[in-house]
Amino acid sequence: MALSVDQKIKLRVSRQIILTGILLGLVYIFFSKGPTEADQYAFYRFRNGALVGLFLGICISFLELVVFTTGIRKLKFGILLTLRTIIYLLLCSFIIFQVVALSDMARYDLSYRQVLESEIFLHDYVINGDFRYAVLFALAFAFSINFTRMISRKMGQGVLLSFITGRYFIPTTEQRFVMFLRLANSKMIEQELSGYQFHSFLKEYFYSITEPIIRHQGIIYEYVEDLIVISWSMEKGERNANCLRTFFEIKEALKDHAEKFMMKYNIIPIPQASLHTGELVRAEIGNIKTQVVFHGDVMNTCARMLDQTEVLNHEYLVSQDVIDIIDVPFLFEANNVGNYSLKGKSVPVELFSIEDKELTRI
């Protein structure tokens, strides 16, 4: 049975987490007690380090890909950081304790109870030995990993790493796909809801559509009121027609949450989008507040295309440049809606509407 795109992505991320866990386990053993020629127990320690890393990687994969993808992300930053750090610390401590205990069972041919009651394990390792330092290392690891991940998430995908490496300190040109996505009739919705309700509505709306964007390897560039700007590298956007499929996955996600939106706000969110591609300049900008931004005609063109969705009464418009690159999946059809002179453009842009095919069951 073939894996879905979502399953393949989760499998790849899980593999990376597990391999990183094993590496960190070995690194900790090496620096805590480096191997020496006279050290007859080096093999057992490195084996334990690898096993701790393996089991920890498996558990963290489950937490990151299953548990922490649910509503727990809606908690306040400080509460969520504390909760995640405690969970990671308890998990690390439990796995270290169990792996060393089971290793001693095999090495000394003892039962689990005998190991727990033994002088070597209880006093020499747990109370007066390396277990205390392993727990401190686990605490530092849990806090630093969670803090970094959460800050990175707040800043946007890949932004923190870009600042650290200085990747965009010098402006860089990139070929990218760009999507502008907004709510249909957003002004009417804003008038029907109070300011607080509209904020709450937008927060739940953005939360509902984030997963399909990430699943199809899109990068959320910015939010502007009800507008969200998404981009893809050429490779990731073209792969499996990710940049085209994302809009329809967003529609499906909103259908799944339609009852919730109707009950809370008496409104069902309907998205509109435009998709364009071309060369962009990506660079750091600002002093007091620094940001990695995109500059280029692609952004202006995509914004003007979004305005045309209402004029032409189409929910999803893409440019000829996109159609030339992407093989439109069989379930969708691209309909040419004509050439249009967009504001700020000297040359007309050929636009296509992308829609679901009406399939007939035989």
Image (cartoon, rainbow, N blue to C red):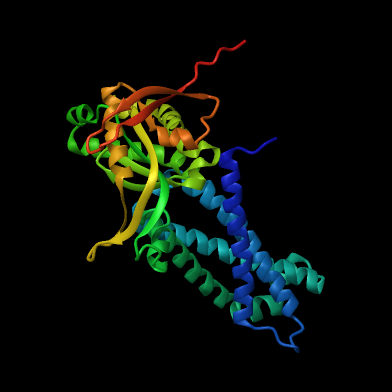
Residue 158 versus residue 338 in the image, above or below:
below
Residue 300 versus residue 248 in the image, above or below:
below
Quadrant for the N terminus in the image: top right
**Observer-nearest residue: 213 or 60?**
213
Lateral position of residue 353 relative to residue 224, left or right: right
**Observer-nearest residue: 44 or 337?**
337
Residue 188 versus residue 85 in the image, above or below:
above
For the point 64% across and 72% down, the residue is 26
x%, y% of residue 319? 38, 33
On the image, which quarter does residue 306 sit in? top left
Quadrant for the C terminus in the image: top right
Lateral position of residue 181 relative to residue 41, left or right: left
Q: Is residue 129 visible?
A: no
**Observer-nearest residue: 95 or 44?**
44
x%, y% of residue 74? 37, 47
Q: Is residue 335 visible?
A: yes
For the point 68% across and 65% down, the residue is 51
For the point 70% across and 75% down, the residue is 45
On the image, which quarter does residue 123 sit in? bottom right
x%, y% of residue 253? 44, 32
Lateral position of residue 335 relative to residue 48, left or right: left
**Observer-nearest residue: 189 or 32?**
189
Q: Residue furthest right?
A: 109
